[in-house]
């Protein structure tokens, strides 16, 4: 099934970068049961496929469980995801939730963006399922662009330098979140999904694609900078792992 794209340069780069991230940050250990949060988009499908590829030849023994949350958005259908998971032979779980109804009820009172609120609700569902399914790690499909965009958003809008770490102990003190695609750029996941002929679905959220959303503004800005000066994204990603506190203004390091 994978022979159509496993020889491509894009696929080889994704496998190499993901394997390096797992090694650099100790993302997966022997005996882990890794939940892969599968949205049905290009990034999470890429994550599932590359982890399965690495699982087959990894020096440690681990298993995968694909979990797709149906948020209840009118434009979202998990049927396509379930059909593909079943066809490919992955162990999976489809969770129907009331996330859309909760967002509708709270939309006039939110002090955060819809996307942030939705993400918090999804994380809560994932954490619960991880306990029920005895998963030791939760793998998210955030890629290098997501890390860079989060860094810029934090600096521009919150006045702090932070991003998405490759490995994080959740606030509940129990679940461990990992981001194995932290070295992989979005154009690579898009190319892979196209080569593999993966049927993609969007989240179906009626507001997340609005031009007023801050992340889309940052994405557009970053894309323009990269077009004008190729290599900027590589440098920003490298900066996340090359911090010089001595040359900043945080008084805790003085």
Image: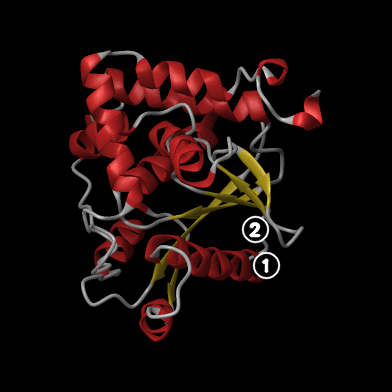
Residue 92 image position (x, y, % from top left): 46, 62
Q: Quadrant of the C terminus?
A: top right
Q: At 27% across and 21% down in the image, what residue appears?
A: 226
- Could you say which is closer to the camera, residue 233 or residue 55? 233
197 on left or right of 46: left
Q: Say whether residue 3 is visible.
A: no
116 on left or right of 164: left
Q: Quadrant of residue 103?
A: bottom left
Residue 166 image position (x, y, % from top left): 59, 36
Q: At 65% across and 22% down in the image, what residue appears?
A: 248
State how far apart marks 2 and 1 are (Cα): 6 Å
Q: Quadrant of the N terminus?
A: top left
Label 2 environment density (alpha carbons within 10 Å; few <14, some 14–19, many ≥20): many
The residue that disc 2 covers is 135
The residue that disc 1 covers is 131
Residue 127 image position (x, y, % from top left): 61, 65
């Amino acid at each position: 099934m994978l022979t159509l794209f496993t020889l491509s340069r894009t696929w080889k780069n994704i496998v190499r970068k993901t394997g390096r991230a797992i090694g650099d940050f100790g993302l997966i250990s022997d005996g882990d049961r890794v939940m892969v949060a599968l949205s049905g988009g290009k990034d999470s499908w890429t994550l599932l496929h590359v982890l399965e590829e690495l699982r087959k030849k990894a020096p440690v023994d681990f298993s995968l469980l694909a979990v797709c949350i149906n948020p209840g958005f009118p434009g979202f259908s998990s049927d396509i995801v379930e059909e593909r998971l079943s066809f490919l032979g992955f162990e999976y779980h489809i969770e129907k939730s009331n996330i859309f109804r909760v967002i509708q009820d709270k939309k006039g009172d939110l002090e955060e963006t819809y996307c942030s609120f939705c993400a918090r609700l999804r994380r809560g569902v994932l954490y619960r399922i991880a306990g029920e399914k005895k998963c030791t790690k939760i793998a998210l499909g955030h890629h290098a662009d997501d890390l860079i965009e989060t860094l810029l958003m934090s600096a521009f809008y919150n006045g702090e330098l932070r991003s998405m770490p490759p490995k994080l102990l959740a606030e509940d003190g129990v679940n461990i979140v990992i981001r194995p695609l932290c070295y992989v750029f979005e154009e690579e996941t898009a190319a892979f999904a196209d080569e593999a002929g993966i049927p993609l679905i969007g989240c179906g959220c009626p507001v997340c694609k609005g031009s007023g959303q801050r992340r889309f503004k940052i994405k557009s800005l970053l894309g323009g900078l990269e077009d004008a000066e190729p290599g900027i994204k590589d440098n920003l990603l490298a900066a996340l792992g090359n911090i010089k506190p001595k040359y900043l203004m945080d008084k805790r390091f003085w």
